[in-house]
Amino acid sequence: MSLLEISGLRASYGRVEVLHGVDLTVDEGQIIAILGANGAGKTSFLRAVTGGVSASGARRFNGEDLAGRTTAAIARLGIGHVPAGRGTFTDLTVEENLRLGALSRPRDRRSETAKDFGLVFATFPILKDFRRRPAGALSGGQAQMLAIARALLARPKLLLIDEPSLGLAPLTSRDLFERFEQVRHEWALTIVLAEQNARLSVKVADRAVIFARGLAVHEGSTSDPATVDAIQSIYFGGAADAVDAHPSGSRPPAPEATQTGEGRR
């Protein structure tokens, strides 16, 4: 069943158009990786879905039209968003951050809040150990876990996560990505990851959508050799018209982005 349906999506910042007619369908229960280099349109796509940027085109979530709705109204429909950079409240404790996330739960799920706190701590045990620490004292990986956990406590149906590996060491990123399958099943979620680290993304995602220059230039199963070719072409060729140019034959593994600083977008 299609949970999110996007057709002809265009988005702009002022007079600068950054998405040029994106079509995408996300089925319930899937993990989708949105891949692409800096400036490809990944973050803008997530913001267009959640109402954070001026957008046009058809956008439907769980049968509801998203056009004209505020970001808060879209969140209440069941779309959670973890932005790049985490966005935790550093002066509040870990537990206080989590309780803020729980405030926006649907009314019919509020009686399950205590149970879901237990589920959060089972998914991210370090947050239980550090629940009384200020969020600002956490490492980058721990802060990313907190940002995801806070979004989970709102009980979304769809979770959009922007650049989860941003600024993290490789081992920390790997540990985080290995939890996404657990999150999908235990929280009955559909997940869309916008990410540059293709190697980690294709290990956890069912499908990959590759963005270049504000367009979705390839979509396919992460197990499809054509998708691996497309990833190679985008990351090493750097242009939308290079998507299918990779020669046939032996294929190296999907590339892992090497940029890890705060400037990576």
Image: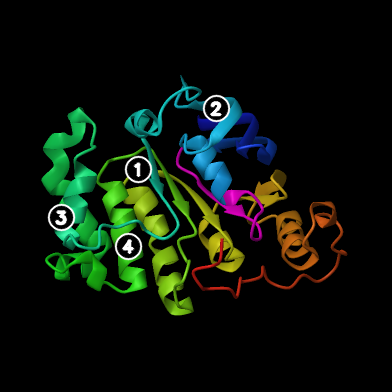
Which residue position is annotated with label 3? Answer: 96
Residue type pointed to by label 1: Ala
The foreground one among 79 and 176 is: 79
Residue depicted at 85% across the width and 68% down the height: 249
- Percent position of residue 113, x then y: 15, 43
Q: Secondary structure at mark 1?
A: loop
Nearest to N terminus: mark 1 or mark 4: 4
Tell me, yes or no, if residue 27 can be seen here. Answer: no
Nearest to N terminus: mark 2 or mark 1: 2
- Percent position of residue 214, x then y: 69, 45
1 vs 4, front mark: 4
Q: Is residue 261 above or below residue 107?
A: below
Q: Secondary structure at mark 2?
A: strand
Nearest to N terminus: mark 4 or mark 3: 3
Q: Secondary structure at mark 4?
A: helix
Q: Which disc number belongs to residue 84? A: none
Which residue position is annotated with label 1? Answer: 188
4 vs 3, front mark: 3
Tell me: 159 left or right of 203: left
Residue type pointed to by label 2: Arg
- At label 2, counting other C-alpha atoms closer than 10 Å, the crowd grade (few under 14, some 14-19, many 20 or more) is many
Which residue position is annotated with label 4? Answer: 145
Tell me: 48 left or right of 97: right
Q: Is residue 256 above or below residue 145?
A: below
Tell me, yes or no, if residue 7 can be seen here. Answer: yes
Which residue position is annotated with label 2? Answer: 59
Q: CA distance from mark 2 to mark 1?
A: 22 Å
Predominant SS of the magenta segment: loop
Residue type pointed to by label 4: Met
The foreground one among 218 and 101 is: 101
The stretch drawn in magenta includes residue 49:
no
The foreground one among 168 and 90 is: 90
